[in-house]
Amino acid sequence: MKKQPLVHLATPSRSTHLHAAWIKRAITLLLVLSVVIAQPLQPVNLGSTADFAILAGSLVSNIPNSIVTGNIGLSPATGGNITGFGPNENSGTIYTTDAAGPAGSVAAASMLTTAQGDLTIAYTDAANRTPVPAGTFLNPGSGDIGGLTLVAGLYKFTSGVQVSIIGSDVTLSGSETDVWIFQIASTLTVGNGIHVILAGGAQAANIFWQVGSSATLGTTSVFKGTIIADQSISLGTGASVEGRVLASIAAVTIESSTITVPGLITSVDDDEMLPEVAILSQNFPNPFNPSTTIKYQLPVTSQVTLIITDMLGREVSVLVNNVQTAGNHQIVWDAQSFPSGTYIYRLEAGSHVSMKQLVLIK
């Protein structure tokens, strides 16, 4: 029988294997890039600290006259370590751990413990954001960002940061939804008269400066964004901040300074003006018996929960638990069946959390 010729199957060459491997890596890279592109940088969730213009651990010191729009809080230090505030320098509430605070302050040790806990969570979140910055997002300007224009994104500094002390401002350029997070290993220093400038619709509410030690803002400087510092924050004479100054362990000191929480406005009764974040107003009347009105504003349609707790954090009443549209809202709490005492009302609107105290006196 005549033998049939053997059919030889071609063995893939090394170049074929390399080509296939290259294609596989390219597809993987494209998939990774598509995920990154599809998931833009998200803001840091400040939790219950979002309503605080100032939050400190050891001291809050003011040299008049300053203008603070937002709450002021100090914990674990006692209320006697809040000094220098006149009656017209703060539009929010001063919260203390005891009754030793300035006139008109409110003792709210439990709420402040929660706020400091939320500050730790926010600090850790900002410090641990990934992917680890590289290229132009790693140590831009060798740590002195004066004169630079920085697009939105996650920036990392392996030591300290200066916003130039030689006369050059820094510009943050992006849209109203873009987010900036600065991971700073040690200090943040802003020179006298230096400005952080926002361009292209960038919003102070979306800018976060995580500071590994302490922050110092020079005289008449203009700063944008929330400072989340492990140690202290100091504002020179006439410095202004659209944002928050939140110090975990040490002091916040200000001098004829202006601090405004982003989104807080003074004409809260104007139906055509909406804040950038949810705003929870102080109940009225307060103290009250037996009912009081709670007002709040929503910037967008949100899932809203409004609850009443006692000073130990135990829930005693649910006033709202549904989706509500953007705009002004109010609800009356009838506390006829509750004993006299101090209570906390807590608003959750989307990812935003706000808390305030009310007093029932019978």
Image (spheres, rainbow, N blue to C red):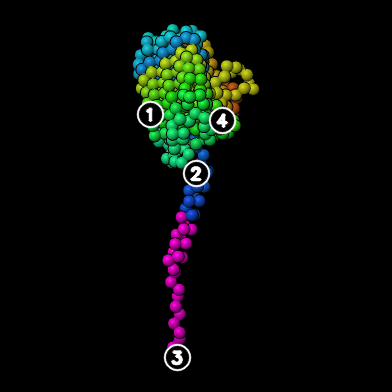
Residue 78 figure quarter = top left
Q: Which residue is rendered at x = 51% and y = 14% of the image?
A: 67
Residue 340 figure quarter = top left
The answer to which of marks 2 and 3 sits earlier in the sequence is 3
**Residue 13 covered by magenta stretch:** yes
Circle on res. 36:
2
Which-is-in-front pick, marks 1 and 4?
A: 1
The residue labelled by disc 4 is: 202
Find the distance from the CA under tag 3 to the CA under tag 1: 85 Å
- Expressed as whole percent of the image width and height from the top left, the position of residue 118 reads 41, 27
Give the residue type that dot 3 points to: Lys
In the image: residue 333, left or right of residue 126:
right
The answer to which of marks 2 and 1 sits earlier in the sequence is 2
Circle on res. 2:
3
Q: Secondary structure at mark 4?
A: loop
Seen from the viewer's position, the closer of residues 325 and 333 is 325
Residue range in magenta is: 1-25
Circle on res. 186:
1
* Pointer 1 local density, CA inside 10 Å: few below 14, some 14–19, many at least 20: some
Q: Which residue is rendered at x = 48% and y = 12% of the image?
A: 256
Q: Secondary structure at mark 1?
A: loop
